[in-house]
Amino acid sequence: MTGAHRPVALVTGANRGTGLAIAAELHAGGWEAWGLNRTPAGKSWLPEAPCDLESADAVTAAVETVARRRGRIDALVVNAVARSLGRIGTLGLADWRAAFDVNIVSVLPLLQAALPHLRPRKGSIVLMGSHAGSRYFEGGAAYCASKAALKALAEVLLLEERPNGVRTTLINPGAIANEIGDDSPFKLSTSSVARAVRWVVEAPADTAIGEIELRPAHLPDMAVTGLNRLQAV
């Protein structure tokens, strides 16, 4: 498909790691993937709309820019994340707020801007959750709590928007090899997660996939604590 006939997907945090892999997978599948990024990815195949998720006005402007230029939005992938880590006794208030501002607060204006364009297309929304939303670990108060809140939001969104033809899916991955050079056999590859996202947004029109859990296939033979618990689910 080319031009106006290509389905359009918005992907937040598409400048690196999992977000970039998701955008690349959608692009390979014939989608026109747009990155909503604060820091540009600079990829020739990836159009981008500048977006600071901590600014509701910037979020709305980015969505409207794409809608105006392309005339449609068929899918929204909420991927950007602030992974604020720290034990409760010493966690900085700024880190606590940043986790919620990016991981949950920013999602509301993003959804409110995108929904009017998704409804006519009978589009899909993918919220990238985490095992951290239900499998908690030491040092993960901000990250775990914000991902748990996203899980609740995903279910309410599915209930409210399914009558409008918009399907919402929460994808909960375990540990992902997000950093350059990370080839751990105990983590999911970014490309594997991206394939799951594409499968969801291309699901048959009569199917609403409420929630998917992705686990690394191999377990480490070691005691785990903290963030590493997500490698051992």
Image (spheres, helix red, strand yellow):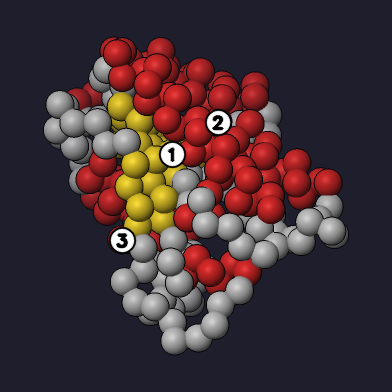
Q: Which residue is mark 2?
A: 107
174 or 108: nearer the eye? 174
What residue appears at the point 44 percent right and 32 percent down from the top-left corner? 154
Per the model, the C-alpha gap separating discs 3 and 2 is 24 Å
53 or 219: nearer the eye? 219
What residue appears at the point 50 percent right and 65 percent down from the top-left corner? 230
Per the model, the C-alpha gap separating discs 1 and 2 is 9 Å
Q: Position of residue 219 (x, y in %)?
A: 39, 78
**Vertical placement of residue 220 versus 227, above or below:** below
Displayed quadrant of residue 164? top left
The local secondary structure at tag 2 comes to: helix
98 displayed left or right of 105: right
Displayed quadrant of residue 124? top left
Q: Which mark is residue 192?
A: 3
Q: Which mark is residue 15?
A: none
What residue appears at the point 36 percent right and 63 percent down from the top-left corner? 215
Q: Which mark is residue 127?
A: 1
N-term mark: 3 or 1: 1
How many C-alpha atoms fall within 10 Å of the one at disc 2: few (<14), some, or many (≥20)?
many
N-term mark: 1 or 2: 2
Q: Position of residue 162 (x, y in %)?
A: 31, 19
Q: Amino acid at mark 1?
A: Leu
